[in-house]
Amino acid sequence: MDIALIAVGKTATGYVREGIEEYLKRLKHYIPFTMETVPDVRGGKLSEEQQKRLEGERILSLIRPADRVVLLDERGAEYTSEKFAERIQKDMASGLKRLVFVIGGPYGFSPEVYGRADGKLSLSKMTLNHEMVRMFFVEQVYRAMTILRGEPYHHR
């Protein structure tokens, strides 16, 4: 199984980008993982709804019909790191080819993206910076892989 992360907007902050790159490098030893960036639609005279729709079209263009799509959303399910690892293990065991997680733009997702989603995941009840969410998420996927292999990265 491959895991993909689709995120709206680039990661501009250097230390966040470095953190993401570190965990992407570590993940290579466990599972194919890709991160794709969709350009954000800032400024101009677009309404929030127009912005979400345009970003949504770009997100949906990267999703394949057979993908399992999980949105990182404040109203999503919350997991412990162990339960998240179990969820990924179930997807791996199911024969799924690609598991796709999506981080939206500042206004969230369009109705079309919500309609395509197979689930929603929340990393916290707090509102988090979109750049930081990327790093936290990639770290959690790495943590899940080490949990599944029984490696000592995660302390219980």
Image: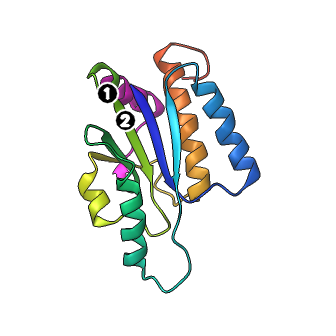
> Which label sits in the foreground, 2 or 1?
2
| Residue 99 - label | 2
Q: Amino acid at mark 2?
A: Leu
Q: Residue at x 58, y 19 (%)?
A: 29
Ranked by sequence position, the earlier of labels 2 and 1 is 1
Which residue does the image show at 53% across and 35% down from the upper left? Answer: 140
Q: Are marks 2 and 1 in contact (CB under 8 Å)?
A: yes
Residue 154: x %, y % from top left: 57, 24
Magenta-drawn stretch contains 81: yes
Q: Rounded to the nearest whole Å, what is the CA distance between mark 2 and mark 1?
A: 8 Å
Q: Secondary structure at mark 2?
A: strand
Q: Which residue is mark 1?
A: 91
Measured as percent of width and height from the top left, residue 28 is found at 58, 24
Q: Which residues are magenta?
A: 76-90
Relative side of 48 to 30, left or right:
left
Which residue reaches farthest front? 61
What amino acid is labelled 1 in the image?
Asp
